[in-house]
Amino acid sequence: MSVTGSPDLSSSEARTPARTPDATAPGTDASDVTIPEYVQPPDRSTLPLVFTAPRRGKPPVHWADLDPAQRRGAMEAAGHRAYRARQLSAHYFEGLRDDPDTWTDLPVAVRGELASTFMPPLLTPVRELTCDDGDTVKSLWKLHDGALVESVLMRYPDRVTMCVSSQAGCGMACPFCATGQGGLQRNMSTAEIVEQVVDGARKLAQGTLADAEAGRTPRVSNVVFMGMGEPLANYKAVSGALRQLTTPNPDGLGMSARGITVSTVGLVPRIHELATEGIPVTLALSLHAPDDELRDELVPVNTRWNVDEVVDAAWEYAKTTKRRVSIEYILIRDVNDQPQRAEQLAKVLRRRGTWGWVHVNLIPLNPTPGSRWTASRRRDEDEFVRRLQARGVPVTVRDTRGREIDGACGQLAAGSADIDASVQVPARRG
Ligand code: SF4
């Protein structure tokens, strides 16, 4: 799930500081609020919701698709001793090395065979664009079947965030989203997701990024599933990727679940399932409207699970995992940015309690080319924030990175469908 190119959830770059809920905050009684007709109604998406990905040729199985027991079994099946699996995992997950020439603790005679068997190339670089003085790097990848996906690396003074794709395309049909308008091509595999993070980590470790001087955070500290696709519609691969990211070295990347955010438009059964995985990642619910009438149009999956159902599921997620849920709300001029909708949003959230279970991230719309919608006026944005704060709802306005490089989700891929991968960025190993 993604709409903007800078899906970082931290508040440190946000323009509006978060506040502690204040039950005594002044303001009109939200229960009196009537949502007016919106001035500029969006076109209802004519695309169908697609929950089951089309069957296409599966990507080759990669080391990052396997759990430690499967790796040992695969190593033995390939005619090698099981302990070699741990060596190979240390190279891949800990050392970020996929160049067999660097696997010096493995016999020279087997290195090439292990690389071709267990680490087939999954992501072919097509294009790489940077902005924000080199701190934002957006990558366009071609998958084995030609599908294009994007990832974004964002460097901040205190952390590095990778935004990853989980599907090629998306079946959720959100009408303001370039990816959604392209439909769903296929689910990505666990390893295709993990490889996006490993690539970013490798670039940092190897110092291949511009301005990669000492003093920067040297590793990927945060991962957000806000690239192309609806992560919870590809649940098995995404939950597998979460395990690979959080399993300690050398069997996984050893990241903290606290640094990982999974974004969803609200697939309620999968939200409940995620809550029981034992990996307490942050859940980001893309609400975008507090009322069913508008949300049915902006987020078509609302016709399956409505506002009350998805907010209930988010609340239960927070209760089970003890992780604060992030409510994502794109501000679209004259569509969902009216003061009354801010009041309604506060009411919807506060109805579930004020124990700090939720935080609102307001996102200035990054319009897709040709879009009839645009970002809210600054004064409307400020008033929306003020109304939420007055109701004691913690809120930030997201700093949006990457706008100058087709930052919105799917824009780079949409504009590059005819690119020949061989003439852009050479493939790289190691
Ligand atoms: S169409 Fe898919 S990728 Fe686009 S905003 Fe909706 S859920 Fe996210």
Image (cartoon, rainbow, N blue to C red):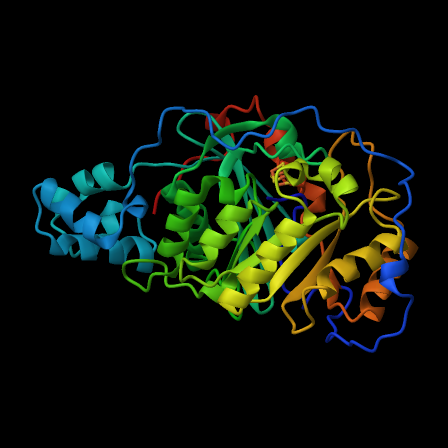
- The image shows residue 334, relative to residue 102, as above or below, that is above
Q: Residue 102: percent from the left, percent from the top?
A: 25, 52
Ligand 1 picture quarter: top right
Question: Which quadrant would the N terminus be assigned to in this image?
Answer: top right
Q: Residue 320: percent from the left, percent from the top?
A: 50, 65
Seen as rendered, the residue at the extreme top is 418
How many marks on residues? Answer: 0
- The image shows residue 376, relative to residue 220, as above or below, that is above
Judging depth in this view, the residue of 292 and 285 nearest the camera is 292
Whether residue 94 is visible here, answered yes or no, is yes
- The image shows residue 226, relative to residue 254, as above or below, that is above
Res. 159 image quadrant = bottom right
Name the residue at 78% across, 61% down.
Answer: 347
- The image shows residue 358, relative to residue 105, as above or below, that is below
Q: In this view, does 291 lie to the left or right of 334?
A: left
Judging depth in this view, the residue of 422 and 414 nearest the camera is 414
Judging depth in this view, the residue of 141 and 295 nearest the camera is 295
Res. 367 image quadrant = top right
Name the residue at 84% across, 42% down.
Answer: 335
Judging depth in this view, the residue of 169 and 407 nearest the camera is 169
Q: Is residue 131 left or right of residue 77?
A: right
Name the residue at 54% across, 29% down.
Answer: 184
Q: In this view, does 146 lie to the left or right of 409?
A: left
Q: In this view, does 345 lie to the left or right of 246?
A: right
Whether residue 217 is visible here, answered yes or no, is no
Res. 39 image quadrant = top right
Q: Residue 371: percent from the left, percent from the top?
A: 78, 32
Q: Residue 234: percent from the left, percent from the top?
A: 46, 40
